[in-house]
Image (cartoon, grey):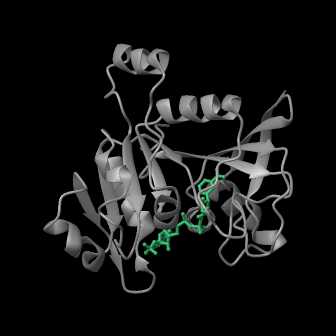
Amino acid sequence: MLTPPLSRPHTTVILAMTADGKISDVGRSGVTFGSSVDYQHLEACVAAADAVLMGGTTLRSGGTAMRLQSPQLLAAREAAGTPPQPVQVVCSASGTFDPALPFFRQPIPRWLLTTTEGAGFWQTHSGFDRLLTVDSSETGLDLQAGLTQLRGLGIERLAVLGGGHLIATLFELGAIDEVRLTVCGYIFGGTAAPTPVDGLGFSRDRAPRLRLLEVKRVEDEVFLQYQVLHEDPAEEKDSDV
Ligand SMILES: NC(=O)c1ccc[n+]([C@@H]2O[C@H](COP(=O)([O-])OP(=O)(O)OC[C@H]3O[C@@H](n4cnc5c(N)ncnc54)[C@H](OP(=O)(O)O)[C@@H]3O)[C@@H](O)[C@H]2O)c1
């Protein structure tokens, strides 16, 4: 039987996390804390993607996107016939960003996934190469429809670089296939510090389940690769009989 084509990209989350499970400090600053090895790992994951997705707060706190710079990775993309840089897609219902952010001067393709209202400013200001509007009467922004649009625009492999709010919605939609976490030798603490998955949380019976595919240790960091176990609707139906 033929497998129906996915209506969304294959989606991999890539994050650095402290040993106490935080992805930033209590100030929610754009502080980076991974080693140079983690940077290379992240760059390789980004190079394997057609597009990168990040939440509005992540862009506002860091001010830039990860631009590929490794000559080897750029050469590999060229050899594969892919554009030098993956598309940087920012998810933001408000569309509110300072046009002076360094992000808007980086030589990278930039798309904005937003609402009709959020797109307003950028229709008359340069900054984004493409505006994707996906309104929802319930949640403001229809992220599922956004993923479908990305797939329709040729994005097959999507790297999600945070933050916890965006990733929570993606998990709620069942739209994450892989999680790559680097556990770094820091403790940030603080209930207000963001974690890989924020939002409302899941009770244990609804919690997404992961299969550990790989563990690698380099000095004080541990690189974890998980596959997200998606429920097979056919199996679920069979078990009801
Ligand atoms: N350690 C790491 O690897 C790593 C990676 C990434 C980020 N971070 C850190 O994580 C923090 C940011 O995470 P965060 O959870 O606060 O924010 P976030 O997920 O980056 O962004 C949240 C914002 O994105 C937009 N958004 C996300 N999901 C949406 C949805 N389903 N519908 C509509 N809009 C949506 C909204 O933008 P608008 O408000 O504009 O509407 C929302 O306010 C920062 O401190 C950053 O440094 C760490």
Can I make out residue 168 in this image?
A: yes
**Ligand number 1: quarter of image:** bottom right
| Side of 25 relative to 41 (left or right) | right
188 and 11: which one is in front?
188
Q: In the image, residue 39 lies at what x, y percent?
A: 62, 34
**Which image quarter is the C terminus in?**
bottom right
Tell me: residue 136, above or below residue 170.
below
Point 68% across, 56% down: residue: 231
Residue extending farthest left = 124
From the viewer's side, name the closer residue of 154 and 159: 159
Q: What is the quadrant of residue 192 in the picture?
A: bottom right
In the image: residue 108, left or right of residue 7: left
Name the residue at 57% across, 56% down.
Answer: 162
Q: Give the image quarter of residue 143.
A: bottom left
The image quadrant of residue 173 is bottom right
- What residue is drawn where x is 55% and y is 32%? 43
* Location of residue 156 with respect to 175 vertically, above or below: above
